[in-house]
Amino acid sequence: MKKISLLLLVCILPLLHVFSEPTKYTYNYDFWSEQVVSPDAYRPSAYILGTSLGVGNFREPQGLFVRGNRVYICDSGNNRILKLEVNEEGEHNLVSVVSSVIIDGDESPFNYPMDIFENRDGCLYITDTNNHRVLKLDEDWNFVYSITKPDDESFEENMEFLPVKLVVDFAGRIFVQARNVNKGLMEFDNRGEFVGYMGANKVKFNFIDYIWKSISTQAQRERMDLFIPIEYSNVALDNDGFVYVSNSSGQADPVRRLNAMGQDILIRNGYEKPIGDLAYGNAGGILGRSRFIDVTAFENDSYACFDRTRGRIFMYDFQGNLLYAFGSVGNKEGYFLQPVALEKMGYALYALDSRASALTRFDLTGYGQMINTALNEYKAGRYESSAEIWEQVLKMNGNYDLAYIGIGRAALRQGDYQKAMKYYKLKHFRVGYGKAFQLYRKQWMEENLWKILLILGILIIVPALIKYSIKIGKEIREA
């Protein structure tokens, strides 16, 4: 008997190791702003180094872009850009390494290129930062034109043009985030001509500092910090042509979605605004709130933000609800030392780490896939299907508030307001509950108006009839 027990233990131990292996620290926040552990939505599937591609170590990589199955890496410290392609087996194959461009017959080397963008026509746009220019190349890397310092009064004479990040919208407009420019994104037309600025950050200031500054002398005010807008840290384009911007100041809204007029149209209907961590300590020399260094948007209007403070990726849905957060600072797989860029390929994520000189790919788990499918079904108007999938999510994670909200949201769209109220109430979602209650009250009134009118009629007419009957009876008796 002892031998059989020992044999069973030997067989079970490996399985226990598999099922008890710690996950990649995925969590969410509940209504009370408490962290709630969650199943993994993403797991690392590839770890790409320069040595694994046969080109030597990356050096301070800063930029990343994905289009189709193509991945571009700006290996900034080595003054080169790498182009990779992902095959059907998920392998990343090196296609080309480009370190210069031919202009008027002369070779012009890159000098710390920090970003690259490929538009729908295959043209490439590069922020060649330390060469103080933006390059436009065709799909074969042939020079088309360059953008240099604009001849505009908004640029001071001794101010350098240092383009850092860029996107190009469907109309060919080029939006450049430049260093030391806090008036918003620099906008250029499709010929490279400077147009102006778009979407400046709002000025944030402390009210006490404002009062103190108003009563200070001129000399004291000159020594104080100026109330000036904050620079963006990165820029991205979604599938609808809207521009997402992030800033890592920790002061203004860390992520915004800009329309053509530069107005922020990001929806913020979650428990809290999309700001990253709600609760945090200052242990291990890591201080302060989340600071978003990049953002990338998906087809279902969800978006992911990369936090440089604690190396975490925060995923939000189209209403601003936090779906999940994962990652941390460290040398472990799926962790980061110095996050700099984030991109998506389908629903896979690519995260670039400058200090580790590595690119990590994350793929959805079954749990993460289920959440995305529920969101997709809702966006497509298949509310019953969406609710059914959220029910499956609850079986995997009974503490997942958004699943309750998702079921309530689907019920609301289907006109089942009582069910919507029930699920919203379970997770204290006041905004949704208020809307569902308002619609339920209207529906109830429409369905029961005839009953109300009948009761009112009875209350008005019956007493009058009784009074009239009594009067007639009295008159008959007296006669």
Image (tube, grey):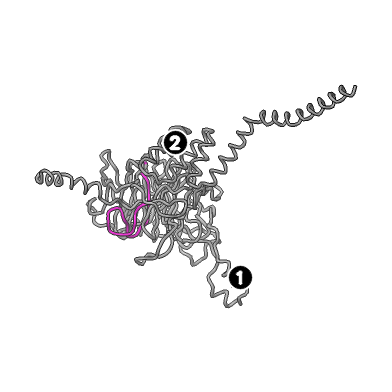
Q: Is 348 or 320 nearer to us in this picture? A: 320
Identity of the residue drawn at 85% across and 24% down:
472
Report which quarter residue 108 is drawn in.
bottom left
Q: Position of residue 308 (x, y in %)?
A: 39, 59
Q: Is 406 or 425 nearer to us in this picture? A: 425
**Magenta includes 187?**
no
Kindly check if marks 2 and 1 are in contact, taking CB atoms under 8 A apart as contact. no
Tell me, for residue 387, which label it has, or none: 2
Secondary element type, mark 2: helix
Please tell me whether residue 20 is drawn above or below residue 457 in the rendered image: below
- Horizontal side of 284 relative to 407 (left or right) equals left
Q: Position of residue 17 (x, y in %)?
A: 21, 49
Q: Position of residue 247 (x, y in %)?
A: 46, 57
- Horizontal side of 109 relative to 159 (left or right) equals left
Label 2 to label 1: alpha-carbon separation:
52 Å
Q: Which quarter of the rendering shows the N terminus?
A: top left
Report which quarter residue 307 is drawn in.
bottom left
Q: Give the range drawn in magenta.
A: 326-346
Asked if one can make out residue 59 in the rendered structure from this viewpoint, the answer is: no
Mark 1 highlights which residue?
Answer: 211
Identity of the residue drawn at 57% across and 74% down:
221
